[in-house]
Image (cartoon, grey):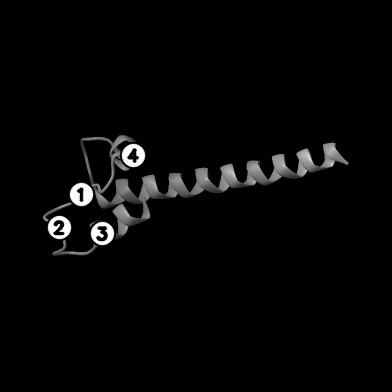
């Protein structure tokens, strides 16, 4: 998502806004592409990644406590 957002901000690299991978295409959708929509999708991706990382760390700590 970060790649899609940063590439869309550089004028002259592409003719308009593009999506570089299929996962981002499914998350952003087909219509209404804009820099704001890319930024929003990027923020959601960052928040969900941090949430998943936090849950993974909590599960690992809880699992290690059960073994002792």
Where disc 1 sits, the SS reads loop
Q: Residue furthest right?
A: 68
Contact between marks 2 and 3 (CB within 8 A): the answer is yes
The CA distance from mark 4 to mark 1 is 13 Å
Q: Nearer the viewer, mark 4 or mark 1?
A: 4
State the image coordinates of residue 53 (x, y, percent, origin top left).
Answer: 59, 47
Which numbered disc flags the more N-terminal residue, 1 or 3? 3
Residue displayed at 77% across by 38% down: 63
Tally of numbered tags: 4
Contact between marks 4 and 1 (CB within 8 A): the answer is no
Contact between marks 1 and 3 (CB within 8 A): the answer is yes
Q: Is residue 62 left or right of residue 50?
A: right
Please give the label number shown on residue 23. Answer: 4
The CA distance from mark 2 to mark 3 is 8 Å
The CA distance from mark 4 to mark 2 is 20 Å
Which numbered disc flags the more N-terminal residue, 4 or 1? 1
**What residue is disc 3 on?**
7
Contact between marks 1 and 2 (CB within 8 A): the answer is yes
**What residue is disc 2 on?**
14
Where disc 3 sits, the SS reads helix
Which numbered disc flags the more N-terminal residue, 4 or 2? 2
The CA distance from mark 1 to mark 2 is 7 Å
State the image coordinates of residue 56 (x, y, percent, origin top left).
Answer: 64, 42
**What residue is disc 1 on?**
18
Which numbered disc flags the more N-terminal residue, 4 or 3? 3
Residue displayed at 58% across by 44% down: 51
Which image quadrant: the C terminus? top right
């Amino acid at each position: 998502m970060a790649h899609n957002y940063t590439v869309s901000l550089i004028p002259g690299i592409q003719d308009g806004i593009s999506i570089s991978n299929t996962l981002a295409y499914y998350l952003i959708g087909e219509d209404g592409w804009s820099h704001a929509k890319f930024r929003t999708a990027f923020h959601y991706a960052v928040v969900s990644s941090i949430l998943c990382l936090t849950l993974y760390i909590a599960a690992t700590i809880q699992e290690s406590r059960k073994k002792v």
